[in-house]
Amino acid sequence: MLLTRKIALISLLAALSIVGRIYMTAIPNVQPSTVIIIITGLVFGARFGLTLALLTAIGSDLVLGIGFFTVMQILAWGVIGLASGFLSHVHKKVPMLIMAVYAGFCGYLFGFLVSLNVLIGGVPSFIAYWLMGLPFDTYHAVGNFLFYLVLSPVLIRLLEAEKKKLKI
């Protein structure tokens, strides 16, 4: 029963993250997926954050298009999920505004890590590609900051209640 509940929970979070990403495509790089991965990592730890990162990248890219960038998205969101999992023991002590800044920083981190796929063309290609993407990374960062402020009070409370039921 406990395993079934965990699978259902990660499935629901993945669906929320995937649908949020798909329906926000009209605004470039602004989507709730990164924040949902961050909050999941903060509440349930690195393994949950990493699992949600994998499901979000693959699930949303099945609709939006799959390419080598999907691997880089898994890497980037995976790093964010892991990092958030490592912060799970201290996030309650950190003010929400600081955590929102962390979420904003994750937008830049995501863009940097996804840009690493251009290293195949050499360092100058990577630098040019990464710099050209900075405006979009800024959209992602600002979106993450705002999504964190809006989603975290409710989602953290709901997930903490579920965590107690799961006895994790």
Image (cartoon, rainbow, N blue to C red):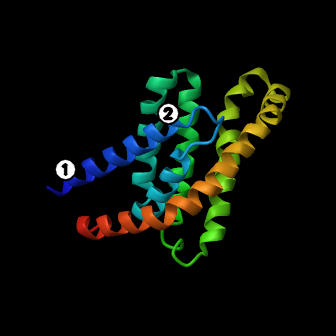
User: 53 left or right of 112?
Assistant: left
Q: Quadrant of the C terminus?
A: bottom left
- Name the amino acid type tagged 2: Ile
Position of residue 86 relative to residue 14, above or below, is below
The residue at 57%/43% (across/down) is 31
Q: Position of residue 35 (x, y in %)?
A: 54, 53
User: 97 left or right of 166?
Assistant: right
Q: Residue furthest left?
A: 1
Disc 2 to disc 1, C-alpha distance: 27 Å
- Residue 17 circle label: none
Q: Residues within 10 Å of mark 1 (few under 14, many from 20)?
A: few
The residue at 37%/68% (across/down) is 160
- Name the amino acid type tagged 1: Thr
User: Residue 54's image quarter?
Assistant: top left
Of callouts 2 and 1, the N-terminal one: 1
Q: How many marks?
A: 2
The residue at 80%/25% (across/down) is 122
User: To which residue does mark 1 refer?
Assistant: 4
Q: Residues within 10 Å of mark 2 (few under 14, many from 20)?
A: some
User: Residue 130's image quarter?
Assistant: top right
Q: Position of residue 119 (x, y in %)?
A: 73, 28
The residue at 32%/69% (across/down) is 161
Q: Position of residue 146 (x, y in %)?
A: 63, 56
User: 64 left or right of 52?
Assistant: right
Q: Position of residue 152 (x, y in %)?
A: 50, 63
Q: Nearer the viewer, mark 2 or mark 1?
A: 2
Position of residue 140 relative to residue 82, above or below, is above
Q: Secondary structure at mark 2?
A: helix
User: To which residue does mark 2 refer?
Assistant: 22
117 or 59: nearer the viewer = 59
Q: Secondary structure at mark 1?
A: helix
Dot 2 and dot 1 residues touching (CB under 8 Å): no
